[in-house]
Image: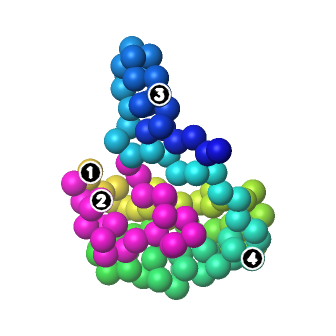
Amino acid sequence: MLLRAGTICLAVSAAVTLLGGCSATPPPPVLFLSDEQLSGVYDDFTNRLLPCLRLLGLSIGEIPARDLFVSQSAGYPRWNPYLELEPTPAEGDWPLIAARCPPPALVPHLLPD
């Protein structure tokens, strides 16, 4: 059975309160992607997400080569375009960015909290 933060919070609410509370959004389940899936995520980043972010007036730092992206990912993307944006978006800008330029379907949890 997969436990999520919300389930743990409900089960041990008194202890969690002492430890500082729960996040409103539970963490994503652990996901391991194959090299083929990671290559597809890279395609989505470079063909859809990056151009979309640029249309919002944001630039992205150095983009890794596909083979480096796949080999260093170890089952989940280690390079995240949202964390490379320049200028760094203000906290209030993230809902617009998420709506207009959502992450790939295989890795929906890439947006910063």
- Name the secondary structure under disc 1: helix
Quadrant of the rendered structure where residue 78 is? bottom right
Q: Which residue is mark 1?
A: 91
Answer with left or right where residue 89 lies relative to residue 18.
left
- In the rendered view, tell whether residue 46 sits above or below residue 30: below
Task: Give the residue at x 47% y 28%.
Answer: 11
> In the image, which disc is placed on residue 36?
4
> In the image, which disc is placed on residue 11?
3
Crowding around mark 4 (Cα neighbors within 10 Å: few <14, some 14 to 19, many 20+) is few
What amino acid is labelled 4 in the image? Glu
Of callouts 3 and 4, the N-terminal one = 3
Name the quadrant of the N terminus.
Answer: top right
**Along the line of sight, which residue is nearer the eye, 110 or 57?**
110
Of callouts 1 and 4, the N-terminal one = 4
Task: Give the residue at x 44% y 16%.
Answer: 15
How far separated are the C-alphas under marks 3 and 4? 38 Å
Q: Which residue is mark 2?
A: 94
Q: Nearer the viewer, mark 3 or mark 1?
A: 3
Crowding around mark 3 (Cα neighbors within 10 Å: few <14, some 14 to 19, many 20+) is few
